[in-house]
Image (cartoon, helix red, strand yellow):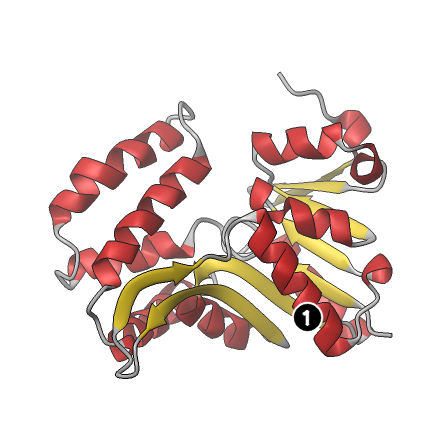
Amino acid sequence: MTVAAFFDIDGTLYREGLIAEVFKKLVKYEIIEPEKWYNEVRPEYQKWDKRQGNYDNYLLKMADIYIEAVEGLHSSQIEFIAKKVVKQKGDRVYTFTRDRIAWHKKQGHKVITISGSPKELVKEMAEKHGFDDYKGAEYVMDENHIYTGEVIPMWNSQSKEKALIEFRDKYDIDLKLSYAYGDTAGDFSMFKSVGYPICVNPTRELVKKVMEDTEISEKVQIIVERKDVVYTLDSQCIHII
């Protein structure tokens, strides 16, 4: 049997949301009209930035606009932008998560990322950080590699659970001996599936779900990385205000 470590990317490895960087490039290259940012996405970003809104709402709003933006584009355009983003921003990661990837590889574990970012981005990050395999949100293309406007998500809990099971079967993984790293409620199904769940700078919603599940709360580690300090907590230290 194989031991694996499953990693989310946005907010877990990468310090923000990679799709936000792609979004900025789409605006820069005039693929998305700037008004889309100012009128639809920016208000959600400002709410989150002021800690008055939900981080997931901000990312989901960007995902909605992204779906509209890529419809009719050729895959090579998005692949080009994905390479640019990862080349420029791909090292902007949490020290804790980067070190854990290295530790797992040293132990001989399979290192896999399951991310809600577009698979073109996830592929580039997987190659850069040495993942053995990956899955990301798939924006459907026709036979000419033109995006149709349809999407197969990988940001919700059900999608991530399905992906994890596929990897389990593909690599003969013992989930009870395996690890999962995530930061939002979309990662909760991975936590329920493995023996060693680790929250990395988790959202309030994820912490609440973890605390309400006795099985997970007894074994979860909560990691908070701020500036150059990494704090390791267990569920007994957490009090939601």
Q: Position of residue 132 (x, y in %)?
A: 64, 77
Above or below: residue 184 compared with residue 163 = above
Q: How many marks?
A: 1
Q: Is residue 44 left or right of residue 97?
A: left
Q: Residue at x 26, y 32 (%)?
A: 43
On-image quarter of the N terminus: bottom right
Q: Position of residue 203 (x, y in %)?
A: 56, 35
Instruction: Evaluate whether residue 183 shows in this view.
Output: yes
Q: Quadrant of residue 4?
A: bottom right
Q: Secondary structure at mark 1?
A: helix
Tell me the kind of residue under disc 1: Phe
How crowded is the residue under tag 1: few (<14 C-alpha within 10 Å), some, or many (20+)?
Answer: many
Per the image, the residue denoted by label 1 is: 167
Q: Position of residue 232 (x, y in %)?
A: 74, 40
Q: Quadrant of residue 61?
A: top left
On-image quarter of the C terminus: top right
Q: Residue at x 23, y 55 (%)?
A: 68
Q: Is residue 121 left or right of residue 93?
A: left
Instruction: Evaluate whether residue 99 shows in this view.
Output: no
Above or below: residue 188 compared with residue 178 = above
- Residue most toward the bottom? 144
Q: Residue at x 36, y 74 (%)?
A: 83
Q: Position of residue 111 (x, y in %)?
A: 68, 70
Q: Residue at x 32, y 33 (%)?
A: 44
Camera-side residue of 231 and 19: 19
Q: Is residue 138 left or right of residue 135?
A: left
Camera-side residue of 240 and 50: 240
Q: Quadrant of residue 76?
A: bottom left
